[in-house]
Image (spheres, helix red, strand yellow):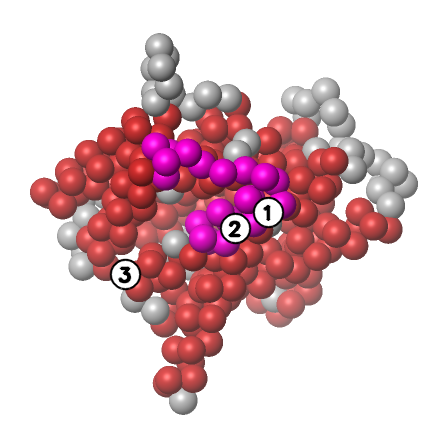
Amino acid sequence: MQHHRHQIAVSGLLFGAACWGVIWYPYRLMQEAGVSGVSSSFYTYLIAALIGALIFARHWRGIFRLPQSAYWLALAAGWTNLSYVIAIIDGEVMRVMLLFYLSPLWTLILAHFWLKERVGLNGLLVIVTSLVGAYIMLWQPGALPMPRNDAEWMALSSGVAFALTNVITRRSSHLSLRVKSMAVWLGVIVVAGVMLSFQSMPLPALEVLTLQHWLLMGLIALILMAATLLVQFGLTVIPVTRAAVIFLFELVVAAVASYYWANEALSLREWFGGALIIVAAVVASRMSDQHQV
């Protein structure tokens, strides 16, 4: 029974990694059909939240007694997911993902100053390795090694927000899987709604959206729901160290998908910088698993 549970957990993590490795493609299809990333995110997470509300209906009596950390988690996770989607739609898939994978660096820094956790020698190694990898990947002749467009800045901010989400989650271990999942979905809806109010392109009217639009957004919503729930379950069974290695499957899926679906490929220099970022992420996960961050 325990072996079967372990297999389901590993499969759940692989499924989640694969989903995030290809989720950019249906979002790009939506944008090509005239629905922006912010609008499609609003609708897809609204669908996910509505389905989640029906599934978790009997647990809603305590919604007004949620701790403040649940709301902060919603905002941080909301920006993480929304900015990631925007970045992955407009930017080069692998560069966006590798910039996002700088999140262990920001987690270390936030944990040190907010949670008062010791960084130590391994923590300094993660920081230096991440920064060197980012420098190599972002290096351009005659220019500072910085993100080169809005999409890459969005990817960087998504990684920072993900680190903030991790720190808030670490301080909110009392929150259930249901609360965490709903916080993510509702957070994206709120953040997307705020962003839409500042954009020149308004939310598409319901009558403008075709059946094909709704079917595609419904598919995205179901994939996001399944990925969220399965990954959360997997993390309750699989140690963080192993989970971090399994999550790297996302980069493999994204590399293959972006090559065949978008004709995108990284240069050798970008791959080398990205490899250093991945090494730093694995080291950071081992530190987290041993409570030495």
Q: Main secondary structure of the magenta part?
A: helix
**Extreme residue toward the left, this view:** 121
Disc on res. 260? 1
Compute the Cα span from label 1 to label 2: 6 Å
Q: Which residue is mark 2?
A: 256
Q: Amino acid at mark 3?
A: Thr
Q: Secondary structure at mark 3?
A: helix
Residue at image position (84%, 36%) is 205
Which-is-in-front pick, marks 2 and 3?
Answer: 2
Quarter that holds the N terminus: bottom left
Residue for point 34% across, 69% down: 238
State whether residue 102 appears in this view.
Answer: no
Residue 187 in the image: state x and y as whole percent: 56, 44
Q: Would residue 127 be found to the left or right of residue 96 on screen?
A: left
> Which residue is rendered at x = 66% and y = 60% of the image?
222
Q: Earlier in the sequence, mark 1 or mark 3?
A: 3
For the residues bearing labels 1 and 2, Cβ distance under 8 angstroms: yes
In the rendering, at what x and y percent does residue 56 appear? 61, 66
Looking at this view, is 284 or 172 the one in front?
284
Label at residue 241? 3
Q: Nearer the viewer, residue 28 or 119?
A: 28
Q: Which contiguous range is marked in magenta?
A: 250-271
Total count of labels: 3
Q: Residues within 10 Å of mark 3 (few under 14, many from 20)?
A: some
Q: Residue 177, relative to residue 146: is it above or below?
A: below
- How many other residues sit within 10 Å of disc 1, few (<14), some (14-19) or many (≥20)? few
Q: Secondary structure at mark 1?
A: helix
* Amino acid of disc 2: Val
Mark 2 and mark 3 lie on one chain; the one further toward the N terminus is 3
Q: Residue 234 in the image: x percent, y percent?
A: 42, 68
The magenta stretch spans residue 257:
yes
At x 19%, y 48%, the residue is: 293
